[in-house]
Image (spheres, grey):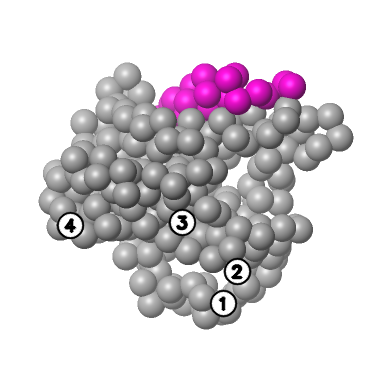
Amino acid sequence: MPENLIRGLGTSLCEWQSSRILARVPIISHRQLIPPGQRLVVVAPHPDDEILGCAGVLAGMCGRESELLMIAVTDGEASHPGSQEWPASRLCEQRPLESVNSLAQLGLDVAALKWQRLGAPDSQVAGQERQLCERLHALLRSTDRVLTTWRFDGHCDHEAVGRATARAAAVKGACLIEVPVWAWHWARPQDPRIPWRRARKLLLDEELLARKRRAIAAHVSQVTAQGSAAAVLTDEIIERLLQPFELVFL
């Protein structure tokens, strides 16, 4: 799916709230999604995708940190091309720290978490897709629940990571869970491109939504405007991702 789908203001939150097909998506509990005793492996293209797409899923792992593996494919160093305030060298250090801080906002014991930073080049993951698949295969177990960005999410890295993770999980025999992030921007409320039959909703109550909002805010480099340029994560983008549920594709 071409990356230029991510342009303009995108589909509004109001439009999504009026979607009849979205309203009919079945609900799934955290226990059903990540059964006790099964490890959750989250494969994030960039440091923040795990929060934007599945903060509620992660918050449900509080007390189960030993059953959680966080994998950051890139360090997100290409989010501000040409910026003097946020050069790639600074972002390589800053964005992983923001991920740690955001997970702490969800209530997770970050000291108990297991992490893997794979260091793939931001915005160029497709060129290393085969190698990424091999690295993921070595890290996965057949009993894992493996969560990553949807293979047709509209961002080149999200799609490459989604494809590589899907292949690695299939070869390993692990359960794949995909989440949309940028699809909320370009898709329409009744969009036939969304795999609605595979969709499930994990409900988020007000307290959990507040935690997710704080976790997003912890990604300071992404939510802060730079001069006359808008933040990478604008208010419109954030509000679409703070609906009272998270959508997963099983």
Q: Which residue is disc 4 drawn over? A: 171
Q: With respect to residue 67, does 5 lie above or below?
A: below
Is there CB contact under 8 Å for labels 1 and 2? yes
Q: Residues within 10 Å of mark 3 (few under 14, many from 20)?
A: many
Taking depth in this image into account, of 158 and 13 the one nearest to the observer is: 158
Q: Which kind of residue does numbered mark 4 sit on?
A: Val
The residue depicted at 32 percent of the width and 49 percent of the height is 130
Q: How far apart, in angstroms, are the residues tagged by discs 2 and 3?
A: 15 Å
The N terminus lies in quadrant: bottom right
Q: How far apart, in angstroms, are the residues tagged by discs 4 and 2?
A: 30 Å
Marked residue nearer the N-terminal end (3 or 4): 3
Q: Which residue is disc 1 drawn over? A: 191
Give the percent coordinates (x, y) of residue 86. Answer: 67, 24
Marked residue nearer the N-terminal end (4 or 2): 4
Q: Which kind of residue does numbered mark 1 sit on?
A: Asp
- Badge nearest the viewer, 4 or 2: 4
The residue depicted at 21 percent of the width and 31 percent of the height is 66
Q: Which residue is disc 2 drawn over? A: 187
Taking depth in this image into account, of 211 and 72 the one nearest to the observer is: 72
Does dot 2 land on a helix, a strand or a loop? loop
The mark found on residue 159 in the picture is 3
Give the percent coordinates (x, y) of residue 249. Answer: 38, 64
Magenta residues? 84-108
Q: Quadrant of residue 115?
A: top left
Q: How far apart, in angstroms, are the residues tagged by discs 4 and 1?
A: 30 Å
Does dot 4 land on a helix, a strand or a loop? helix
Asked if one can make out residue 84 in the rendered structure from this viewpoint, the answer is yes
150 relative to 242 in the view: left or right? left
The residue depicted at 76 percent of the width and 58 percent of the height is 8
Q: Which kind of residue does numbered mark 2 sit on?
A: Ala
Marked residue nearer the N-terminal end (4 or 1): 4
